[in-house]
Amino acid sequence: IDYTFMYWSLGGEVAPMTLEELNSFVSDRSSNVSIYAQYSPNDDTPYKVNYYLEDADSDSFSLEESVTLSGTTDSVATIPEKTYGIYVKREDHGEYRIDRTGTGEINVYYELPRYTVTFHDATLTGYEGELIQQVKHGADATAPTVTRRGYRFTGFDTDFTNVTEHLTVTPTWEIMNFTIEYDLGGGALPIEF
């Protein structure tokens, strides 16, 4: 499938010989002789390119399409670039040489873009979770638990579900009010100025 026989040749000679010329030459010799078959690479050796897209809800990939192409055996394969909406080709798959078997496959992976979601507030007195997250397109960021002394957390100022861009998210707060009551047991507070 990979090469086509072209002709016979002797040792270091590249001149082609027909089978009759070869038989005549060999029958006239009394010593050993090396005979070589010369082949030419086929220009219709098949290979397959598989295009995979990253799954939105996991880090795995699913086959989107396969394309069967052909080229010259042992030459560098042409790998057509594809466009799949917002997906970005993950990496350069390198050079692929068309193998002799005609069963070679090249896998090309396309990822969803990632966005940075930053939960930011310089007045935080504590937090649990990640304040800076890399989120896949269309996924949700995970809210950290945040605290600020003297304040009650009321939410965040920006929606961070179905993320489609870089975001800075700031917690919102409500000041805590306290009522202090004194029981003086019938007495009075001393007042000094």
Image (spheres, grey):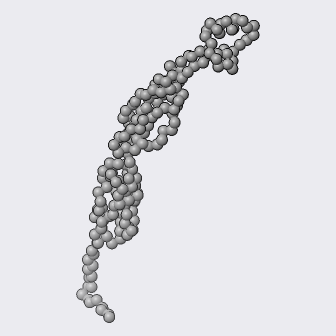
Q: Is residue 48 left or right of residue 2?
A: left
Q: Residue 18 or 26: which is nearer the viewer?
A: 18
Question: Seen from this angle, which residue lies furthest right?
Answer: 30
Can residue 144 be seen here? no
From this view, report whether residue 167 is shown above or below residue 81.
below
Tell me what residue is drawn at x 32 percent, y 94 percent. Answer: 193
**Quadrant location of residue 66?**
top left
Tell me what residue is drawn at x 39 percent, y 50 percent. Answer: 114
Q: Residue 49 or 78: which is nearer the viewer?
A: 78
Q: Position of residue 18 (x, y in %)?
A: 61, 10
Q: Is residue 174 left or right of residue 92?
A: left
Q: Position of residue 26 (x, y in %)?
A: 69, 8
**Quadrant location of residue 111?**
top left
Question: Seen from this angle, which residue lies furthest front?
Answer: 15
**Quadrant location of residue 51?**
top left
From this view, report whether residue 29 is shown above or below residue 139.
above
Q: Is residue 48 left or right of residue 7?
A: left
